Image (tube, helix red, strand yellow):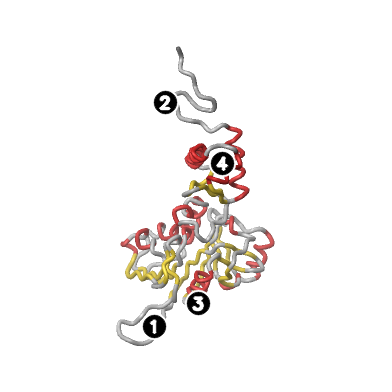
Amino acid sequence: MAAQTPTGGDAIGQPRRLPAGRKAELASYVTELGQVTVAQLAERFDVSLDTIRRDLDQLDSEGVLIRTHGGAVGLSAVPRPDTGLDVRMRMQASAKEQIGALAAGLVTDGAAIIVNAGTTTLAVVRHLRDQRDLTIATNSLQLPAEISPDVVRDLYVFGGQVRFSAQATVGPVSFHRMSPGDDLQIQCDLALIAVGAVDAASGYTTSNLGEATMMAEMMDRATQVAVLADSSKFDRRLFARVAELGRAHYLVTDAAPPAALGRVLEEAGVKVLVAGDNA
């Protein structure tokens, strides 16, 4: 007698497929909320926790959403302050790589650059392949593992409190002398600063107050400033202000800003560099 397939299941040895109706509804629900838990989804769709976990695993493998520990986030969601670096790296990944390649072109041989922690700045670092003799100062704990030793003359990591979710330190933008005395102050040619949001009225913002303070000080330590932000961050504002729009010399992004924001940036003297724009 032929084996019967349980209701809602699949034949033995066949990969389980998420019903199309629930797949679309689940993906839409995650996108709408931005970030959800397995428990929320199980209650919403009236299925077991194990079923939701399998559904999320399948949707993640198809690139529909990003599976997290205990839930999922939508691809266009604004990351929460405690969102892990591994999840952030998969959000807007293509846009970040485009921005990284373009921003890397601003870095010249022998330059001293200051780089804040972030998945977009890590993309820049991965594209620093042809430059040589760079001096880099950063609060990113991940950057030393991402950059090629061939391009670096000296690499410094700022001390301070460690934020494990961001793999970054938060503290003063300075270094202690080997002997007692005042802190050593630094000055760089270029600051590469990834921000969480860009808004005409609020300027550049981020979600963490300590990081905002540190990012502003990094800008003050550089002759030129390039702000990095993908287009999902336009016309949004977060808790802590980093700086006004005019503080940056460049805004490096993957798509042209909305018209109103673009006008304000132009009036502030910010040069917008768009990946793939040959103009």
Please state, as top left, top right, bottom left or bottom right, where the N terminus lies in the image.
Answer: top left
Amino acid type at image mark 3? Asp
Label 4 Cα crowd, 10 Å radius (few <14 / some 14-19 / many 20+): some
Q: Earlier in the sequence, mark 2 or mark 4?
A: 2
User: Which residue is the site of mark 2?
Assistant: 13
Q: Is residue 254 visible?
A: yes
Between 220 and 26, the one nearer to me in the picture: 26
Q: Secondary structure at mark 2?
A: loop
Between 209 and 12, the one nearer to me in the picture: 12
Give the farthest residue toward the right: 260
Mark closer to the observer (2, 4): 4
User: Which residue is the site of mark 3?
Assistant: 220
Mark closer to the observer (4, 3): 4
Q: Secondary structure at mark 1?
A: loop
- State the separation of the CA atoms marked 4 and 3: 49 Å
- State the separation of the CA atoms marked 2 and 4: 25 Å
Q: Earlier in the sequence, mark 1 or mark 4?
A: 4
- State the separation of the CA atoms marked 1 and 4: 54 Å
Is 264 placed above or below 84 here?
below
Q: Earlier in the sequence, mark 3 or mark 1?
A: 1
Q: Earlier in the sequence, mark 2 or mark 1?
A: 2
Q: Position of residue 54 (x, y in %)?
A: 48, 38
Between 126 and 93, the one nearer to me in the picture: 93
Mark closer to the observer (2, 3): 2
User: Which residue is the site of mark 4?
Assistant: 42
Label 1 Cα crowd, 10 Å radius (few <14 / some 14-19 / many 20+): few
Is 112 placed above or below 123 here?
below
User: Which residue is the site of mark 1?
Assistant: 183
Identified at 43% across, 75% down, the residue is 188
